[in-house]
Image: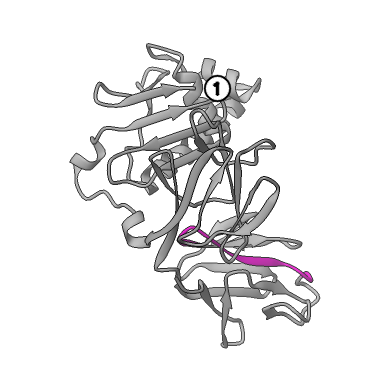
Amino acid sequence: MFTALVRFLLPDGRVAAVPAGGLLGRLATATLRFDDPRVSEAHALVSLRGERIWMLALRGPVEVDGKVVHQAPLRAGARVRLAEGVVLVVESLEVPSEVLVIDFAGEQVPLRGEVLSLVDAARPMLVPRFVEDALLRLWTSGIGWRGQAQGRPFDVKAGLSMVAGGVPVSFRSRGAAEMAFQVTSGAGLNAPLVVRTALDELRVSGENRPVLLVGGLPARIVRELADYNEPVPWADVARTVLGPDDEVGLRTRWDRNLKTLRRKLEEFGYRADLVRLDGHGKVSLAVGSTDTLEVV
């Protein structure tokens, strides 16, 4: 593995290289320092998450390609605006050639996102959030991964093995290209899925594909639909999961969460219509006869 790096084209024409974990701001210790009162002391941070480089807003507003964001993945050509007249263009990105993977109970899950927790010693499951009584917690440090088991923090490295709450766990590296599965034919989209849904967590896996972990409202939508055996009005599910709202507001929030779910499924090479609308106002969970649905 090597250090993730992003090269920015600055407003004055210079090119600045900022590694993962690098701070952008007015502080004298900032990796990319701006002697400009419009920029905050600790304005933003470059962070490595899995095999992608992200820009995180800290004490100042950040726009990526014209949209104000709290966090956003970077791509070559992206325009990052910190303040009026302070616009950086992503000239190039260097990302790790390898991705850390956690092995436990026959599962192989790539480390992605911000925080992961290993829960339930009887049926171990990795969930994308902080859990107080987790067997093991993992989080990104901005340049790599850290972990905590039995109250002791540690650096996560390939080759590390341990027992967390009675569950044997090990970490290894796999090629980023191997983990970034790309669908090249319709057959790939029709491959059997294993869908495991809990109240606030969704896990989707398939043969020779990275495991997808989804939390929050998109996961709750799937969990709610898993209780139905037939299509149900979308508004009924939306009100249960999202809470009361007027029709326009409810539909906007519903569409936003479905878009998030579909984007994540597509990124991992899974079919995007796991939650399927029938065109008549009803919605269902599209789990076929070759798929496996586990409701926790």
Query: As rendered, which of 73 and 281 lies closer to the eye?
Result: 73
Q: Position of residue 9 (x, y in %)?
A: 54, 80
Q: Give left or right: position of 211 versus 28.
A: left
Q: Is residue 125 visible?
A: yes
**Image quadrant in which you'd find residue 206:** top left
Q: Which residue is mark 1?
A: 238
Q: Residue at x 39, y 30 (%)?
A: 195
**Image quadrant in which you'd find residue 42:** bottom right
Number of marks: 1
Q: Position of residue 15 (x, y in %)?
A: 55, 85
Q: Secondary structure at mark 1?
A: helix
Q: Residue at x 47, y 74 (%)?
A: 2
* Magenta-colored stretch includes residue 251: no
Query: As rendered, which of 216 and 74 lies closer to the eye?
Result: 216
Q: Residue at x 76, y 82 (%)?
A: 35
Q: Residues within 10 Å of mark 1 (few under 14, many from 20)?
A: many
- How was this image coloured? one colour
Q: Give left or right: position of 24 versus 259.
A: right
Q: Is residue 19 above or below residue 255?
A: below
Q: Position of residue 104 (x, y in %)?
A: 45, 43
Residue type, label 1: Ala
What is the magenta range? 40-52
**Image quadrant in which you'd find residue 288:** top left
Q: Is residue 286 visible?
A: no
* Magenta-colored stretch includes residue 45: yes
The quadrant of the rendering that contains the N terminus is: bottom left
Q: Residue at x 44, y 44 (%)?
A: 264
Going by the picture, which residue comes out furthest to the top?
A: 229
Q: Position of residue 222 (x, y in %)?
A: 47, 26
